[in-house]
Structure formats: C-alpha cells, structure tokens
Image (cartoon, coloured by chain):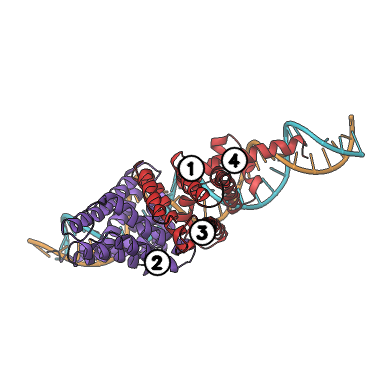
Chain colours: A red, B purple, C orange, D cyan
Amino acid sequence: MTTDGRLVRGDHTRRRILSRAMDIASLEGLEALSIGRLAGELKVSKSGVFAHFGSKEELQLAVIRAAKSVFASRVVEPAFAEAPGRRRLEALCDGWLTYSERRVFPGGCFFFSVGAEFDARPGRVRDVLAEARREWLALYAQTIRDAQQLGELDDSVNPAQLAFELDAFATAANSAALLLDDATAYDRSRTAIRSRLAALKT
Amino acid sequence: MTTDGRLVRGDHTRRRILSRAMDIASLEGLEALSIGRLAGELKVSKSGVFAHFGSKEELQLAVIRAAKSVFASRVVEPAFAEAPGRRRLEALCDGWLTYSERRVFPGGCFFFSVGAEFDARPGRVRDVLAEARREWLALYAQTIRDAQQLGELDDSVNPAQLAFELDAFATAANSAALLLDDATAYDRSRTAIRSRLAALKT
DNA sequence: TAACTGATCGAACGATCGTACTAATAAGCG
DNA sequence: CGCTTATTAGTACGATCGTTCGATCAGTTA
C-alpha cells in the first residue's frame, strides 16, 4: 500500500501527463508529442515531464501502455461481460465501433493513428504496436473459434480470415469518419458486419 | 514547347525532390519531411529546395499532387484499359492491392499513410487528402454502377456500400502487411474481395 | 529537529526546424 | 560581348527539439 504523499503526487502528475499525451498522440501522432509542448499545456516544467520517463521513446512507450489500458476497459472488458460465442463476437465489433464513434480518444482509434504512423519505422515503438494489433486480431479469432465450437457459427469459415474482414470493416469506418467527416461510415460498417455474420448462421 | 535549359534543369531538380519526398512521406509522414533533410540527401542547398516551393505546406501539397499522379498511372489507368463493368471493378481492386504489395511507395499506400497522419488536423493538406479519398471512393462506386447497368452485378447492392467494403478489405491488407510484416494479408484481402463479389453474380 | 528521499524546477547545451535575405552561377538573347 | 532571367548557394534569424545538470521544495523517517 502506498500512502507516501510524494509518490502519490508523482503518480498524479504522471497520469495527467499520460492523459494529455494520449489525446495529442491520437490527434497528431506520437512524434508530434513533444516534451516541451506537454510541459507548456500542463503548466509543468520541461524537466518535470522529462524526469517521469527518462527519454522521449520511453514516454511514447508509456503512452501506448496507457492507451492499451483504456482500450481494454472500454472495448475488451465489456465484451467479456457477454457470454462467449456469437454474442461476445458481436459485442467486440460493436464495442470497437462505439469506442471509435464516441471519440474515447479525440483523434479516433489510438492504435489506428499511431499504427499507421510507425508501421514503416523500425524500433521498439513499432514492435509494441505490432504486438498489440496481433493480440487484438488473436482475440477476434479466438472468439470466433468459441462461437464455432458452440455451434453458433458456421465451421467452414477460417477464424483468422473472418477476423481480418471484421477488423477491416471497423477500421475503415474509423478512417472515413475522421478524414471525410462522414459519420454514416459507422452505419455502413455495422451493415457490412451484420450481413457478413448473418451469412454464417448455423 | 520548353527547351530553355534553365527551366529544364529546374524541372529536373524539382522532380528529384518530389520523388525523394514521396518516399519519405510514405515511410514517415508528411511532417517528417524536412527541407533540410531533403537538401542533405539530395546534395543540394536548403535554400535550393526551399525556392522550389516557397513554404513547407506548399511542398507537402506538391508531394500529394505528385503522389496522385503516380497512383493514377499505376492503378487507375490500368483499370481503365479494361472494359467497364465487372472486369474494370476487379482490375481496380487487384490493381490497388498490387500497387500496395509491390511497394510503389516504400511505405505502402501513400494515401493510407498520410491520410491517417492528417485525418484530425485541420488545414489545406487534410482537405486535399480528403478530396482525393472521396474521388477514389466515387470511382469505385461509379464502376459498380456501370457493372449493374451492364447486368453483371446484382442491382440490389448499394454502390457506396460495396465501395466501402472493397476499400476496407484493401486498406486492411496494406495495414497488416506493413505493421505486422504479414504478406499473407494480401491473400486474405483477395479472398475476401473475390467471395464478396461472387455473391453478387447475376 | 536532522537527515534523507522523491518530485519538480530553471538554466543551459547542441542540433535542427522553417524562413528571410543577399550573393553567385548558368543559360537565353541582343 | 553585355543584359536579363532562372536556378542554386550561403548565411543568418528566432524558435523548438531532446537531453543534462545542479538547485529547490515537499514529505517521510529516525
């Protein structure tokens, strides 16, 4: 148990930094995250921000960890409150779309934005982002497999293939909603997902 | 007719700059494009690069125009060599995937990368990128409409909806291939597109 | 109270950014 | 050859970047 006032204060500052940093990163990317800018916006000294992370790369990695935690609580956990199988699969799809639509991060899905930013830059940041995406697709695939074993989804479909397609529909909605200011893209995405899954009823 | 040696020389330099700039932008984004960096890599002076565009934003806009031209010659024009209708639609899908897979730009699809970078930053760059995406989706939709009028595609499908889905499959392949180093994503994408279109035979 | 620890600050560093100037260079043209 | 025009070079500016270092302030512990 931690009641040391100094640690509590530091933890509070750290959370403030990471919260603002997630917003900036989702809007403008992890490279646009500058320590001086964070310090200015949060009314803290540059070295105060820096001391929490030790380097810009460590800051970026900490921001990604924080975003994973937000994503888990807003998308993954609600889906796991549903029964395994088709119900949970639908909750994953719809939970993701709602997470993008409601702008949990102001720049849309955090991992879409920074994933595209780092997908061609070698380094630890890219590795962590790739791993996060792999975990997400694996979660989709496992949920599909569960639904198949429960007899709720046609056995003939390849789980990785269906995971790819569902994720494609969702991220395309995110992209269109942001770049094109086209909120109807979420409807299109839900239509596509619903009709793809309807074809796989058993 | 232009045979003025000075203009020819300037045009050549400008092309060299834009070519390198497109590669950098596809890999690291339009903001990572710095005038000093371009000058260093191309062995010209900073002011030499600057003089061609007048500002960084104008450089970014010129790079986008150049990328549109590359995209048109590699994807759109080959598809228009095919007969209108289903043939042309399939050429658009496959041409796009091949364009991404062959790394016409080293960072994958130029417009995917910079679109994600600017989708939440107001300004002229975003406006131009949004317009380019709209044109691309409109081209898809028109090609679908043509196929319907030729009796090659089920009339019941909404062209904008199908365009959304086909584009979703393609961009998802680009994203997975880059971030996950997963070249099989192109196969998954082709499978998804083929089976989606097969369901719409008349 | 004294000693210690952790969080934060302030100032400075070298580097790079976009941009603004004024030469220098090269090509066309009389 | 001179005169004009277009492209490049050179230099300097203020701003911001990530990082380093020593000082300062707040809270714990003996």
Front label number (1 vs 3)? 3
What is the distance, in whole Å, between disc 3 and disc 2 at their CAs?
25 Å
Q: Is residue A100 left or right of residue B110?
A: right
* Mark 1 residue crowding within 10 angstroms, few (<14) / some (14–19) / many (20+): some
Which residue is tagged 2? B186
Q: Is residue A8 above or below residue B146?
A: above
User: Which one is nearer the viewer's eye here, B114 or A133?
Assistant: A133
Identify the chain of the residue marked 4, using the numbered disc in the image.
A
Q: How far apart are the two marked residues, 1 and 4, measured between alpha carbons?
A: 22 Å
In this rendering, position of residue A16 left or right of residue B173 = right
Relative image position of residue B2 (x, y in whole percent): 14, 64
Residue B65 location (% of width, % of height): 27, 55
Specify few, some or many for label 3: CA neighbours under 10 Å numbering under 14, 14-19, or 20 or more.
many
* Mark 2 → mark 4, Cα distance in angstroms: 39 Å
Residue type at tag 2: Tyr
Find out whether the residues at labels 1 and 4 contact each other: C-beta distance under 8 Å.
no
Type of amino acid at the residue the image marks with label 4:
Ile
Dots 1 and 2 on the same chain:
no
User: Would you name the residue on which mark 1 appears?
Assistant: A99
Gap in angstroms between the C-alphas marked 1 and 2: 27 Å
Q: Which residue is mark 4?
A: A17
Front: mark 1 or 4: 1
